[in-house]
Amino acid sequence: MIIDLRSDTVTKPTKEMLEVMLEARVGDDVYKEDETTNELETKIAKMFGKTHGLFFPSGTMANQTAIKLHTNPGDQVICDKYAHIFNYEGGGASFNSGVSCKLINGNRGMFTAEQVIEAINPPDFYHSPLTTLVEIENTTNKGGGACWDFTEILKIREVCDTNNLGLHLDGARLWNALVEKNETPKDFGNVFDTISVCLSKGLGCPVGSVLIGDEKFMKNAIRIRKILGGGMRQIGYLAAAGIYALDNNFTRLIKDHNKAKEIASVLTNCSYINNVELVETNIVIFSLAKEIDETKFIELLERKSIRISNLGSGKMRIVTHLDYTDKMHDKLLETLKTLKVG
């Protein structure tokens, strides 16, 4: 039994999901003739109170399309120093859109409206890039699955309105935040211009993200997706997985959160641990004691059939997910309690 906690992207479709996928009504999505894909896009758009949704093969491509929709080459995007669009999308913002990122030194990937105001370049000062977009990530990946304070998001929306800035949400794990904070999709749909949501993380789908927004922002999204190579054909098989996941795997995310918090509680009492960051959702980030070699620690867990991520500088990451069973959870907790390190 391999316990793979490197990411919630390692999940595999359940038998029930596969059955739904096989029964999908499909067509050529490039011609917008795939019934199941159209159904998924409409379903998610309506959930958030938006008019348009568009399926993408990855969250990275959805985010990159959103940046392109909001900006022109030479513009600047405000985001946190931990932002996925800056750290983990291959430099796509500069390559695809020709924009730079002004990084805010936030807290666990989250920043304040006041920090946004300070980061905006004066629009009449032509020596600096023109600020046109603010990007937020909820939950924050590198910030350990942290959930934003919605009141702060509302304040940032006001700043964007005052300064004529777009506001995009990288909601790769927004489903986790919604469940944990008891918020609704429409809460976020009312605030953000564009939102990307991932289906292949906590919801357990094999592939897919959806970008949503209203006509004003989304009218060119399908063109940008084509330019980026994201036009696909009979993708209803994948969209069917998304529909099934939303109907069956959404509210159960709280189980992943509870397991993550139990793992954090155990780690806090382990002598080989220096610090465990606050856990809100399904991500546990912790640092090893200074005398512990991180490579050897990873290898030790591997020998016990446990896989986690090494973030470097002594930091480790565990991500709970749909395929992480109660039996695996019990084994992991016992292993962490009895692990002989050093």
Image (cartoon, rainbow, N blue to C red):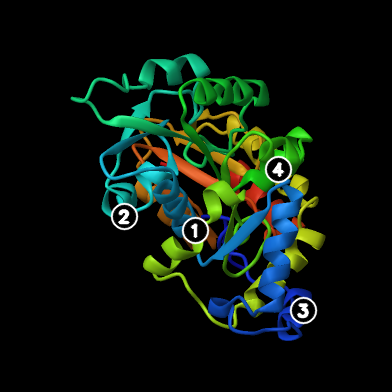
The residue under the point 74% across, 74% down is 17
Image location (x, y in percent) of residue 234? 59, 83
Residue kind at label 2, given as amino acid type: Asn
Which circle's residue, 2 or 3, is located before the other in the chain?
3
Q: Which residue sits furthest left? A: 127
Which numbered dot is residue 221? Answer: 1
Give the labeled residue for mark 4: 257
Question: Foreground mark, 2 or 3?
Answer: 2
- Quick check: 34 above or below 121? below
Question: Foreground mark, 3 or 1?
Answer: 1
Query: Could you tell whether 76 is left or right of 111 in the image?
Result: left
Q: CA distance from mark 2 to mark 4?
A: 35 Å
Q: CA distance from mark 4 to mark 1?
A: 33 Å
Question: Foreground mark, 2 or 1?
Answer: 1
Which numbered dot is residue 296? Answer: none
Q: Are marks 3 and 1 in contact (CB under 8 Å)?
A: no
Image location (x, y in percent) of residue 321? 66, 55
Q: Are marks 4 and 1 in contact (CB under 8 Å)?
A: no
Which numbered dot is residue 96? Answer: 2
Query: Could you tell whether 291 is left or right of 283 in the image?
Result: left
